[in-house]
Image (cartoon, rainbow, N blue to C red):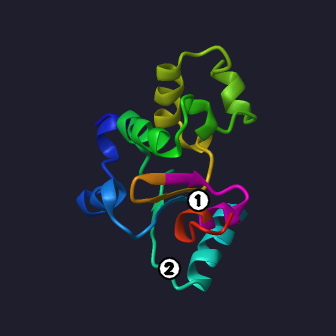
Amino acid sequence: MTNSDRFNIDDELNAKMAGGIEPVVWFNPACSKCRTTQSILAERGVDASYVDYQLEPPSVADLQRVQAMLGATNPRVMARTGEVLWGELELDDATDEEVLEALAANPSLIERPIVVVGDKAVIARPPDRVLELIEPSAD
């Protein structure tokens, strides 16, 4: 099974990502920013679905969809470009497609947490950026 075949989050989460209200969080339980984002949502009584993207890596198509939701033209905004692995894979000069393929194959390179609500997404760094999605007037 290829990486792009493994992560079709599941039908329910795909439906939520496509237009639902409940947030979907690409989550790493070892990440303090992810845990803080989770706390912010919980404090506000917001139910969210948490996807451990390292156990269930997203496909290139999933990454492209989230990139569009972020309003980004370059997939590098979703990447941890300072990681040693980024350099080892020589991704600084890679094409956008190569970056997306590398992120799908190496989910540790995906910036976190990414929060999706409906057709919008944010990279919750700092974690209170999640408020842009759940409290749109909180600028």
Q: Secondary structure at mark 2?
A: loop
Q: Relative to the observer, which residue lies in front, 49 or 83? A: 49
Sequence-wise, the earlier of marks 2 and 1 is 1
The stretch of residues the image draws in magenta is 121-131
Name the residue located 49 percent from the left edge and 39 percent from the top edge.
67
Give neighbour class at mark 2: few <14, some 14-19, many 20+ (Cα, 10 Å).
some
Residue 41 on the magenta segment = no
Say above or below: 137 vs 3. below
In the visual, does 21 lie left or right of 139? left
Camera-side mark, 2 or 1: 2
Kindly identify which residue carries mark 1. Answer: 28
x and y percent of residue 73 in the render? 54, 29
Say above or below: 116 vs 80. below
In the visual, does 121 lie left or right of 87? left
x and y percent of residue 94 in the render? 59, 16
Name the residue located 37 percent from the left edge and 37 percent from the top edge.
3
Quarter of the rendering occupied by the N terminus: top left
Q: Secondary structure at mark 1?
A: loop
Kindly identify which residue carries mark 2. Answer: 46
Residue 123 on the magenta segment = yes
Task: Write down the quadrant of residue 133 in the picture.
Answer: bottom right
